[in-house]
Amino acid sequence: MTAETKKELYDFFKTASDFLHGVRSESVDCVFSDDSSASTAGAECITDSPYFCAMTAQKNSASDTEQADVLIVAQSVADTDAQDSEYLLGADAGQLLDKMLAAIQLRRKHNCFAGQNISVFLDEELQRNPVKCVLVLGESTASVLLNSQDSMEVLHGQFFDYKGTPIMATFAPARLLEYPQLKRPAWADLQALQRRLNNSEYR
């Protein structure tokens, strides 16, 4: 709660108390401060040493033996290896991710735990298994890979170059569940990714 809101509430309750008791109490100057947890609505919680996970995705029309089209990286809710994206991202967020991918004709192929050094993991993974695009979910992951302190509201939907591979950031599924109003810009991001994948230059 902000200091201004606290002051307004204090004045309101003081006035109400004076009215109910039929007296005017002595005015007291009070100093209020913002709560330390106050932040912009929808801001993502970023820890100092987060764990990350990665998932590959390919077009629905592709066979299981074909190489993945997209490498997805995100902050993990788990600190150990797991093959289940619902465990790595959280049950509801994992299910939402599947729906997001299905909407642009993609399906998840593999999941893996990426540890804490996501940059090293990504470099090694792209060397072993090049993809057409990297999709970054969430502000904490984007801040590391894009070396940026900008918020996701600024970064999302743009394509950047990551050592020769196109990379785009969008909102994490968990944040979309908490703030449904962000689903519209996230959908626009996914449509941009789909167009990029369908472009003959990146086939």
Image (cartoon, rainbow, N blue to C red):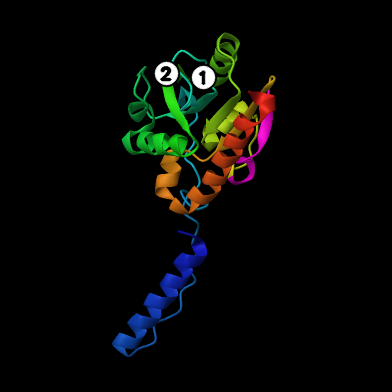
Q: Is residue 130 left or right of residue 94?
A: right
Q: Which is nearer the N-term, disc 1 or disc 2?
A: 1
Residue drawn at x 39%, y 31% as measured from the top left: 89
- Amino acid at pointer 2: Cys
> Residue extending furthest top?
128
The residue labelled by disc 2 is 112
Disc 1 element = loop
**In this view of the protein, which residue sits in the foreground, 62 or 153?**
62
Q: How far from the left and from the top, in percent, is residue 129?
A: 55, 12
Q: How far from the left and from the top, in percent, is residue 159?
A: 66, 34
Where is residue 170, by image quadrant?
top right
Magenta segment includes 53: no
User: Label for residue 68?
Assistant: 1
Residue drawn at x 55%, y 13% as measured from the top left: 125
Crowd band around label 1 with a 10 angstrom C-alpha radius: few (<14), some (14–19), many (20+): many
- Amino acid at pointer 1: Ala
**In this view of the protein, which residue sits in the foreground, 27 or 74?**
74
